[in-house]
Image (cartoon, rainbow, N blue to C red):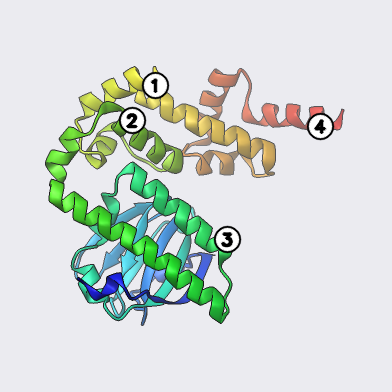
Amino acid sequence: MENFWSEPPQVGIFHAHDFENIWSEHSHITHRIELLYVLEGKFTLTLDNGLKFPAVAGDFLLIPEEVRHRDVFDPSRGLRVLTIHFKWEHSADYFAVVNNRTLCDMDYATRSEAMRRIDFMYEQWEPDELGKLNAGIQLHALLMLFYTSAVRAAGRGNPSAALKRTRPDVARQVKFFLTQNYASEFTLEQLARRFEVSPAYLSRLFRHEFGVSFSRYLTTLRLEAAVALLHNTALRVSEVALRCGFNADSYFIQVFRAHFGTTPGDYRRGIRREEKK
């Protein structure tokens, strides 16, 4: 039995922070293992050996200690990440099984449970001795969840396992992904590749499970997010558009008017008038 099953890691740093541009521009290393959980934005973890791992909100990435890398992202869009630095004596055995590819391939249920656990860890975090000990125990359980997922996936064989997934399973995973990443740029074809199905199958899935096309479903998610920002923030309309996945103000206004019968600016002004009554 591998030793990492019985020996929890030692947590040093655990914080949520906005990444600085320097991490994107220059390669760097850390002297501890890093677990990254993307809260907002997207980036590509680029290792000096040439490997690249794209990540979006809701994704996990692991970086072994002393590995030189860059965190490449668009500074105009920002990147917020929950980061855990830790030491683990038997990490080499663990990384022989768990890697960033297995983390990207986690199924919907495992990813949801992992997100729940790391959110709870962050809520409970205290940077004192007892807090670090507690975080190490909880992190150990999370790492074992990743390990179990990777072992089971390897046993099933990913390609054949993907074919055995039921339509509701795929629908739930796609829905979860879009809810977390509606502001990102991707096509139906790219989404199909991510979930190892054909574009035609995914197109039919949207019609059957959600009653609308892929583009209509994604647009609706983005508009719902835009309405929330118009309600709850003072962001300019152009910034609302950008944060919700609309790359052009004019297109955002056009789509918003077609859906709600008014422009985003008039919609917000109407909200303000109602609040003053």
Is disc 1 surrounded by few (<14), some (14 to 19) or many (20+) residues within 10 Å?
A: few
Q: CA distance from mark 3 to mark 1?
A: 34 Å
Q: Earlier in the sequence, mark 3 or mark 1?
A: 3
Dot in front, 4 or 1: 1
195 to the left or right of 55: left
* Residue located beneath label 4 in the image: 275
Vertical relation: 12 (above or below) 207: below
Q: Earlier in the sequence, mark 2 or mark 4?
A: 2
Q: Residue 171 shows which numbered tag?
A: 2
List x then y, in percent, for residue 176. 40, 38
Q: CA distance from mark 3 to mark 2?
A: 30 Å
Q: CA distance from mark 4 to mark 3?
A: 33 Å
Vertical relation: 272 (above or below) 81: above
Residue 183 visible somewhere in the drawing:
no
* Residue located beneath label 1 in the image: 210
List x then y, in percent, for residue 244. 51, 39
Q: Earlier in the sequence, mark 4 or mark 1?
A: 1
List x then y, in percent, for residue 239. 57, 44
Say what amino acid the circle numbered 2 marks: Ala
Q: CA distance from mark 2 to mark 4?
A: 39 Å
The residue lying toward the viewer, choosing from 120 and 103, is: 120
Q: Residue 123 shows which numbered tag?
A: 3
List x then y, in percent, for residue 44. 33, 58
Q: Earlier in the sequence, mark 4 or mark 3?
A: 3
